[in-house]
Image (cartoon, grey):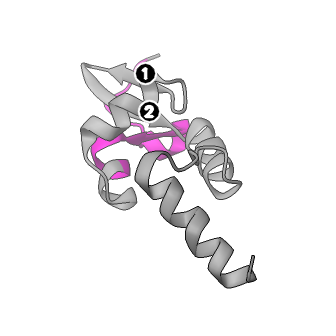
Amino acid sequence: MLSNETIEPSATGLRAAKKVAQDLGVSSVSLWRWARAGRLRIVRIANRPYVTLESLAKFERDALGGQFETPLAGAASASARTRAEKETGK
């Protein structure tokens, strides 16, 4: 039976996308890009976006593990290589 009680989103394993973006210090556009890339799962309830806590936990584990790092390219790569050669004495 339905009641007038509201269910707290955190009790359902969801968190407001806007709040997640604020906590991570990124824009909401970044969240949408990560969701499109399959890194986060966003669901809409009453036309409001929520991030699943399960996908957020996985995202944080993957990020800490370095899964999203990209190798340096172009001038940054050459500069890093030169710096490494100077430090190692080669």
Q: Quadrant of residue 54?
A: top right
Q: Amino acid at mark 1?
A: Arg
- What is the tally of numbered marks visible in this picture? 2
Residue 8 among those drawn in magenta: yes
Residue placed at 36% from the left, 37% from the top?
31
Q: What numbered label is drawn on residue 27?
A: none
In the rendered image, residue 19, in percent from the top left (x then y), is placed at 32, 51
Residue 5 rendering spot, x and y as whole percentages:
36, 36
- Work out whether residue 12 can be spotted: yes
Residue 5 visible in rendering = no
Closest to the observer, 60 or 11: 60
Residue 48 drawn at (x, y percent): 26, 27
Is 43 in front, or is 34? 34
> What crowding class fits label 1: few (fewer than 14 Cα within 10 Å), some (14-19), or many (20 or more)?
few
Q: Are marks 2 and 1 in contact (CB under 8 Å)?
A: yes
| 32 versus 74 height, above or below | above
Element under label 1?
helix
- List the residue tagged with mark 2: 34
Q: Which residues are magenta?
A: 2-20
Give how far apart the Cα atoms at labels 2 and 1 are: 5 Å
In the shown orientation, is residue 58 left or right of residue 13?
A: right
| Residue located 32% across and 60% down the image | 25
Q: Please tell me in which quadrant of the rendered image residue 15 appears.
A: top left
**Residue to which mark 1 is pinned:** 36
Name of the residue lying farthest toward the top = 1
Does residue 14 belong to the magenta stretch? yes
Q: Secondary structure at mark 2?
A: helix
Under mark 2, the amino acid is: Trp
